[in-house]
Amino acid sequence: MVIFSVYVVNKAGGLIYQYDNYVPRAEVEKTFSHPLDLVLKHHDEKVVVSFGQRDGIRVGHAVLSINGVDVVGKNTAEGKDILEYLKDPSNYPVSIRFGRARLSSNEKLMLASMFHSLFAIGSQLSPEVGSSGIEMLETDVFKLHCFQTLTGIKFIVLADPRQSGIDALLRKIYEIYSDFALKNPFYSLEMPIRCELFDQNLKNALEVAEKAGNFGAGS
């Protein structure tokens, strides 16, 4: 089983901790002749596929490298705009590696804030008073699990849909937060967590959970 990532969001909706435990890298590298049979566009400082799918390349995949050299945002390593570079027939044949680009720090901050708002909306939409809000979101490739403490801190885990024992794992992470963040005299509430012992114990808890497929009492 796989646990993808962990997020900790404060009561104001700010991301105070994030750890990527496993990021699948589905990448495809192909050699193309002119004209390029994919439609590319600029999006969030990256160049992504907007139309056309082939050989494992999907809409939304970003250009990661050209001729074996990693790109820098929407530019080649030499500083040329990728779209302009690919318009020039003299640059062909060209080898392009596509894949899903990792989320930037700003994107993670924005998504954490958006989930905080969705959590609040879920509570307000509930037909019953005192709803806990969103505890799980499910897709075909992962599940998002959320545990909110009485003080409003949210612990979020993204995991394989088949991974069991996530509720116990979330409470274990809360225990680690209490022991190694809250009890740290240098830590300020609601602020980003930067504590080596917190990192180490979180990684250990994730490793145990993945190996067992469950996180039982006494772990």
Image (spheres, helix red, strand yellow):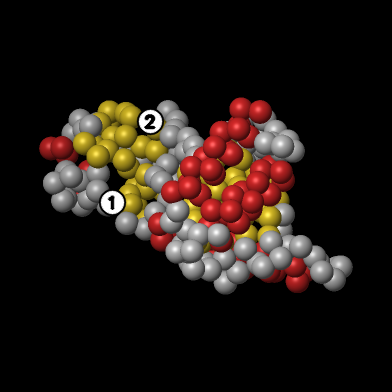
Give left or right: position of 191 versus 135: left
The structure residue drawn at horizontal position 75% and vertical position 67%, both measured from the top left corner, is 123
Residue at figure coordinates x 49%, y 68% from the top left: 188
Between disc 1 and disc 2, the foreground one is 1
Considering only vertical position in the picture, is 98 above or below 40? Answer: above
Question: In this rendering, does residue 115 appear at all?
Answer: yes
* Callout 2: SS: strand
Residue at image location 25% in from the left, 39% down from the top: 70
Mark 1 Cα shell of 10 Å, populated few (<14), some (14-19), many (≥20)? many
Residue 93 shown left or right of residue 185 in the figure: left
> How many residues crowd around disc 2 within 10 Å: few (fewer than 14), some, or many (20 or more)?
some
Q: Is residue 114 visible to us here?
A: no
Q: Nearer the viewer, residue 46 or 134?
A: 134
Foreground residue among 36 and 120: 120
How far apart marks 1 and 2 lie (CA) works out to 18 Å
Establish if 133 lies above or below 27: below
Q: Earlier in the sequence, mark 1 or mark 2?
A: 2
Residue 39 as seen in the image, left or right of residue 4: left
Q: Where is residue 42 shown, x and y percent of the image?
A: 33, 55
Q: Are marks 1 and 2 in contact (CB under 8 Å)?
A: no
Residue 73, numbered circle: 1
- Quadrant in the picture for residue 58: top left
In front: 50, or 156?
A: 156
* Element type where label 1 sits in the image: loop
Identified by mark 1, the residue type is Gly
Q: Position of residue 75 (x, y in %)?
A: 22, 50
Residue 93 in percent (x, y) is at: 20, 30
The amino acid type found where label 2 is placed reads Val
Give the residue pinned by disc 2: 28
Displayed quadrant of residue 219: top right
